[in-house]
Image (spheres, coloured by chain):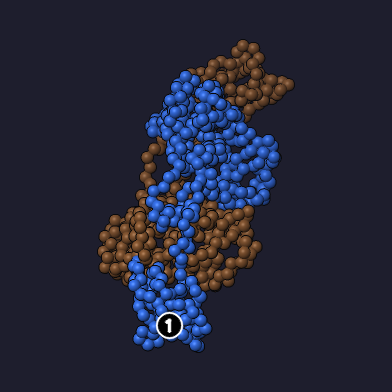
Chain colours: A blue, B brown
Amino acid sequence: MRAADTYGVSEGLPGYLDVTGAVLMGAEPRVTVGPGAAVSMPTGGVLPAGADAVVMIEYTQQAMTGTIEVVRPVAPGEGVVRADEDAAQGAELVPAGRPLRPQDLGMLSAAGITTLAVRARPTVTIFSTGDEVVPPATAELRPGQVRDATAVALAALVTDAGGEPADGGIVPDDAAALETALRAALPATDLIVISAGSSVGGRDETAGVVARLGPPGIWCHGLAIKPGKPTLLAECDGVPVVGLPGNPRSALVVFRLLGVPLVRLVGGCTTPPPEPVVRVTLARDLPSATGRLDVVQVRVSDGTAIPLFGLSALLSVLTAADGFLIIPEEATGLDAGTEVDVTLYR
Amino acid sequence: MRAADTYGVSEGLPGYLDVTGAVLMGAEPRVTVGPGAAVSMPTGGVLPAGADAVVMIEYTQQAMTGTIEVVRPVAPGEGVVRADEDAAQGAELVPAGRPLRPQDLGMLSAAGITTLAVRARPTVTIFSTGDEVVPPATAELRPGQVRDATAVALAALVTDAGGEPADGGIVPDDAAALETALRAALPATDLIVISAGSSVGGRDETAGVVARLGPPGIWCHGLAIKPGKPTLLAECDGVPVVGLPGNPRSALVVFRLLGVPLVRLVGGCTTPPPEPVVRVTLARDLPSATGRLDVVQVRVSDGTAIPLFGLSALLSVLTAADGFLIIPEEATGLDAGTEVDVTLYR
């Protein structure tokens, strides 16, 4: 109806309007609304010419055939969604640099956009090194052998970060073999991750090989972080290279802190999705050394964080954990009862 | 070495051990360690017979050819990981009822488990209804038509929840057509979601059709929630059925609150992954009515939550939002300055 026809109406003094037609769903209205007239219409229907407002059926009642009582006034534009109210012409529908969320896809669909230029998922080639490392499917281990636990976990972290993991395979502790494998991968990858064999020899060879792989070379070899001290960061011919410690837990802790943001950045994701973080109370004292960032796995229970301890080789600490907390470089430790932020594993 | 050979040694009074061999990486040791002897070994090597501890090379120095000085005592078992220390025989490696995390895949790989019985992703068939609804790829809209924005967003939410979305298509506002479509989907789906046409007539038809689809039928039609009041929940022949409001924003808000946990549950996920929640300060008063749960979209900036308002038809409120907060049923609103928990959209 026309809003002006409802001005001053109330429960005690209803207004009367003649119902002169109806709007059908999904079709252009064939009626025009004149003064003192109303047409019935479904939610989502198109406002007919002459009308400037909609009153909900709950605020009307049938008076006699063809006439309704309106007991509540409406303002012009009330009950109406303008065609450009959700998005005006030229408006940005979805910002760049962020993964598309369900509602973003909805908005694009509403605008008829079913194909979209997006950043390609960066290819992340994952190498495992070490004479002792054998594929996970190896049924029987000989003494001294370990199955490759790190590569598959790294691949899952890469996928979570929006990357496309590529399997570089297991390379023996041999500088020439490693160099050949890395050089072959370099032209077709966006990032290289080397999960080192746990031998000191193997790690040293990795650094030497990466140093001569391409300019500018090694950024740093060794981080003030525990676990993860022997981490190597490099860039070779425009490809970032991350050399991880040999212990599976150290490797996964470091890659989650440094590798995941790197994969996102290489993939053009400047606004990463939020991580689940809870503020809880530390259940016991946590010692630490200054000048070093400590990453501590915890279980979270009843608002408290219970630290999990274990050798850096132990994956069970990571599988038992609900999340991790960070003791900053400047702290000598955290006292029981301290409020801490725990990043939860998903 | 044998730990006993290091007892009492110090920087001032080092112990001397004869180096009688070396352990190679990834191979069974061929040496035995006798009293007063030591063998060199890489991190990750196998402890040779006779030895019961490892001293780090940093705490030794070369004395003369074939002899080392040890300046720090070690206890039996020090520097050693027992074969069953990460997981004892028969131990649970990864709990059921939770999505596999990267570290879980690592642990399984370490144990040689590369195939695993998991729950199948539940099939969630998504129907859109309404004479006005046309596919997103429709280039030109006739007056009164809208593109189907809800189905693609629901499919993304289903995928996030671990489900497999199936496209039920767009069904006109016709009870017989809807019943035929639902009956055809019922035997091959684990859950049905109906995104209603926004017409009142269409919604009523959905309830009628669902009521006769199979026992036990409708659980409830109408929820004390805003937006989302007309939501319909049913179970037909063992298949949960969710009827969503016609407005895209209402539909997505309700599905995120009720549908996502339902998809997880149907998929056997009893321990859902944690959601990102931040505690921030409400930037302005939020009115609400008691007896109704309100879901309010917000932007989060500098530790404050800024409520976004708009008609329930507007998707732009959802695309502009960083997350949402809930005003509980018993509250008449929230005052500016209240600490609120905002669930962030990923």
**Which residue is labeled 1 in the image?**
A36
Q: Residue at x 43, y 30 (%)?
A: A188
Query: Farthest residue toward the right?
Result: B12
Which residue is found at the position 68% from the left and 23% from the top?
B71
- Whether residue B102 is visible: no
Which sits in the foreground, A118 or A241?
Answer: A118
Query: Would residue A122 be found to the left or right of residue B10 on screen?
Result: left
Q: Residue at the location (46% across, 85% down)?
A: A15
- Residue B325 located left or right of residue B335: left
- Can residue B40 be seen in the rendering of this structure? yes
Q: Residue furthest top?
A: B65
Vertical position of residue B94 compared to residue A216: above or below? below
Q: Residues within 10 Å of mark 1 (few under 14, many from 20)?
A: some
Determine whether the residue tagged by mark 1 lies in a helix, strand or loop: loop
Name which quarter of the figure residue A177 lies in.
top left
Q: Position of residue B56 (x, y in %)?
A: 61, 25
Q: Nearer the viewer, residue B56 or A95?
A: A95
In the image, residue A67 sits, relative to residue A54, either above or below, namely below
Q: Position of residue B177 (x, y in %)?
A: 27, 65
Question: How far from the left and from the top, in percent, is residue A75?
Answer: 51, 75
Q: Quadrant of the N terminus of chain A?
A: bottom left
Task: Name the amino acid type tagged 1.
Answer: Gly
Vertical relation: B17 (above or below) B223: above
Residue in front for this viewpoint, A294 or A232? A232
Q: Chain of mark 1?
A: A
Which residue is at 55% across, 35% downward? A250
Picture mark count: 1
Instruction: Left or right? Give the position of A123 relative to A333.
Output: left
Query: What is the x, y in percent for residue B163?
Result: 39, 52
